[in-house]
Image (spheres, rainbow, N blue to C red):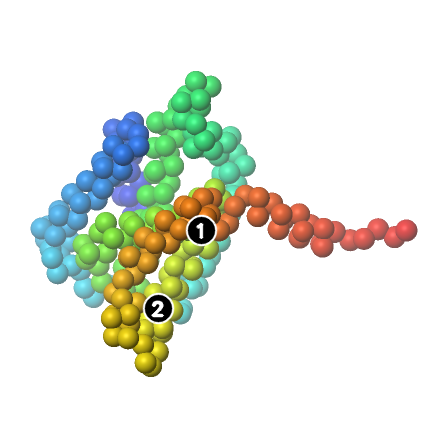
Amino acid sequence: MALAAVLSGLLAVALGIPVLRLRGIYLAIATIAFVEILRVLSLNLEITGGAVGIFGIPQPFPSPIAYLWVVLPLLLVTMVLCHRLEGSRTGRNLRAIREDELAADTMGINPTFYKVLAFTLGAILAGVVGAISAHFLNTWNARQGTFDASIIYLAFVLSGGSRTFVGPVVGGMVLTALPELLRALAGVAGLPLWLAQFLLDGRLIIFGLLIVLSTIFYPQGLITPELLGGLSRRFRAVAKPSLPP
């Protein structure tokens, strides 16, 4: 995991310095193109197993549920670090860039530096999770890093909420459980064949619809800063001991 984190971070710095100077659709095109370049390279290099991929990756745990001993502490540590980052000067600068990059640049904040920093931190986390996923699945191939996977991760963020560190976690849990729910619905007796097939194979279409509906009805996602603030105030009010008269 450490090696995956370091290599992912270095690759993010090398890519982010030239690419993150772009904005809007040009940035999206550049990142999509880079993903496709890596996918094609992994399909043709011997070190990645070519089109077949890498098989027989050791599994340190006897059952899938046992991986929670690694995943849950990693998730909690990541959420704590993100919470601390939000309250730091770096976090405030990142929020300023998110709200208005031009205004942040005018105030003396270097947008390229902080965007590369955020990009690198995200890549480090992705490298760690990718290493765990490879052991969990016992295999790795180029199909696990396609554009479809990017759409799924984008749906996690947009549906859960990109303004808090809790939102993507909630969105990821809900949308990860959604295919299993759709699979269960597809097995209901008496369901038309076309509808059952759509529930099984139309996951990306449903994810796309969720992104559109989230943008229309929940532009900030399901978990918003206001919602978290209200829950925090209620929790403090309940936990606060009542003073004697």
Front-lying residue, 220 or 142: 220
Q: Mark number for residue 37?
A: none
Identified at 36% across, 74% down, the residue is: 184
Identified at 17% across, 48% down, the residue is: 39
Is residue 2 visible to the viewer in this orientation of the structure?
no
Secondary structure at badge 2 equals: helix
Q: Name the amino acid, label 2.
A: Leu
Tell me if 96 is positioned left or right of 51 in this view. Answer: right
Disc 1 packing (10 Å; few <14; some 14–19; many ≥20) = many
Q: Earlier in the sequence, mark 2 or mark 1?
A: 1
Furthest toward the right, the residue is 245
Contact, mark 2 vs mark 1 (Cβ under 8 Å): no
Residue under label 1, please give it.
160
Front-lying residue, 135 or 238: 238
Front-lying residue, 142 or 151: 151
Tell me if 110 is positioned left or right of 150 in this view. Answer: right
Nearer to us of marks 2 and 1 is: 2
Identified at 40% across, 51% down, the residue is: 213
Identified at 35% across, 68% down, the residue is: 182
* Image-quadrant location for residue 133: bottom left
Residue under label 2, please give it.
182
Secondary structure at badge 1 equals: helix
Residue 162 against residue 238 in the figure, above or below:
above
Disc 2 packing (10 Å; few <14; some 14–19; many ≥20) = some
Q: Name the amino acid, label 1.
A: Gly
Residue 203 against residue 47 in the figure, above or below:
below
Q: Position of residue 48 (x, y in %)?
A: 15, 53
Front-lying residue, 1 or 143: 143
